[in-house]
Image: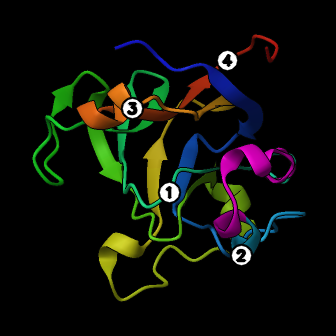
Amino acid sequence: MQEPKISIQTEIQVPSGKLVYQEFLDEMKYGVATNAAVRAGVVAERESEILENAKNGIFSGFIGNSCPGVYRQGDRIIVGNDPDEEGYNRKKGDFGEKVGHIITDGGTYSFADLDNFLHQGGNLNKSTCEHQNPKVLEVTPGRYVLNHFYGFNTEQRNAGKVLYASIERSDRPLI
């Protein structure tokens, strides 16, 4: 599958080697962006908020109510939808091994360093619904780059296989 054009690229440090993720990491200091601001617009109109969130140690992106899977390919994490998977079953496909999913009723995803999240008052068990609690993914400690994609064409949407974002460990400068 060909990756769409990168629309926004940001970076954060993950010194703990653990990425926490869910729809909104509400406890974190979002800076310019607020949950309402991110929900209200499309990613093209929210680039400054996404970049500001990264300055505060959080990856985020607007992807609509798509409830994507989270996949692993070594030190690369994929946020996307794969029509070949069945429900929330974990399997290995084009995007790699499925390691989780994100409920995106509000339209966004969020990733951050676990220690940063906990330091800012984050709670891993805030909901009585287990699938709505933040999840933790172990990664190699270091600098991570988010490539957020948008502007999907009709063919991609109709095929059902959509790559929303990739997060990978990197020492290369941003594009």
Whichever of callouts 2 and 4 sits on the residue coming sooner in the sequence is 2
Eye-nearest disc, 3 or 4:
3
The reply to whether discs 2 and 3 touch (Cβ–Cβ < 8 Å) is no
In the image, farthest residue toward the bottom: 128
Residue, x 41% and y 12% (percent of image)? 2
- Marks 3 and 1: in contact by CB < 8 Å? no
Residue 36: mark in rendering: 2
Query: Mark 3 — residue?
Result: 154
| Residue 122 rendering spot, x and y as whole percentages | 64, 73
Choose the circle earlier in sequence order: 3 or 4. 3
Label 2 or label 3, whichever lies nearer to me, is: 3
Would residue 112 be found to the left or right of residue 116 on screen? left
The residue drawn where x is 39% and y is 55% is 66
C-alpha gap between disc 3 and disc 4: 31 Å
- The amino acid at mark 2 is Ala
Identify residue for label 4: 170
Disc nearer the start of the sequence (1/2)? 2
Amino acid beneath label 4? Ser
Tell me what residue is drawn at x 78 percent, y 50 percent.
Answer: 45
Q: Is residue 67 left or right of residue 53?
A: left
- Residue 57 locus on image (x, y percent): 78, 50
Report the amino acid beneath label 1.
Gly
Whether label 1 touches label 2, CB < 8 Å = no
Label at residue 64 = 1
